[in-house]
Amino acid sequence: MKITVSEIKAEPKHLAYVEDVDELNERLARGVRDFQVARGIRVAVDYYRAGLDLFFTGAVTGEVVGTCARCLDDYPFPLDRQFAFVLTPRVAAVGGGGQLAVDELERSSYAGEEVDVTPLVYEETILALPTRALCGEGCRGLCPRCGANLNQGPCGCARGADSAVSSRTK
Ligand SMILES: [Zn+2]
Ligand SMILES: [Zn+2]
């Protein structure tokens, strides 16, 4: 979603739209984290300027489907992230910023006549994801012998002497 810089005024404007997630999901699929974003993500943003600096505040909401690192089941969870960022003109950022990494620079500055909000929304979404996909803290994972999902109950494999004894005495 692109916003024309000259249309960004001191008076805040509101924008609400649904962001397409295909490209984001491609990016996520390339990473090590097992997440995919379901459908579109809803973006609500207020934007305004103070001098040459552009301010954006808002939220991204939607649904993410994680693939649990322990039991490999897919599980949905809500995405709800507040964000606020300021973009400065790129020339000024280069002059004063010293050794900013290129991607950092792209995230904190703008150049040209339009600001593309999409990469910023993607970035915020990725930041909202947990470091590890787990369907629940208490996920029991898969049986290392038969591969059964232990969240759905014991699989019948004897795990250690204790469980073997207790199942015989029942
Ligand atoms: Zn799990
Ligand atoms: Zn088993």
Image (cartoon, rainbow, N blue to C red):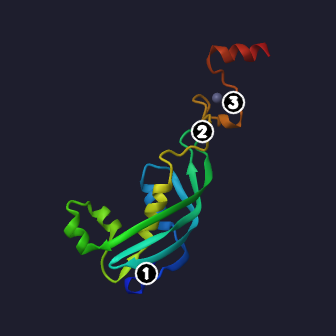
Along the viewing direction, whichever of 143 and 120 lies nearer the viewer: 120
- 161 shown above or below 93: above
Q: Is the C-beta of the residue carrying label 1 under 8 Å from the nearest atom of ligand 1? A: no
- 26 shown above or below 12: above
The residue that label 1 is drawn on is: 3
Residue 131 vs residue 137: left or right? left
Image quarter in which the C terminus is found: top right
The amino acid type, in three-letter code, at marker 3 is Cys
For the residues labelled 2 and 3, say whether their Cβ atoms are less than 8 Å apart.
Answer: no
Q: Residues within 10 Å of mark 3 (few under 14, many from 20)?
A: some
The amino acid type, in three-letter code, at marker 2 is Glu
Q: Tell me the CA gap for discs 1 and 3.
A: 55 Å
Give the foreground label among 2 and 3.
Answer: 2
The residue that label 2 is drawn on is: 137
Instruction: Please give the name of the residue rendered at 45% of the width and 65% of the height, measured from the top-left corner.
Output: 84
Q: Quadrant of residue 70?
A: top right
Q: Quadrant of residue 100?
A: bottom left
Along the viewing direction, whichever of 8 and 165 lies nearer the viewer: 8
The amino acid type, in three-letter code, at marker 1 is Ile
Instruction: Please give the name of the residue rendered at 59% of the width and 38% of the height, measured from the top-left corner.
Output: 137
Q: Where does residue 127 sit, x and y in percent of width and height?
A: 46, 56
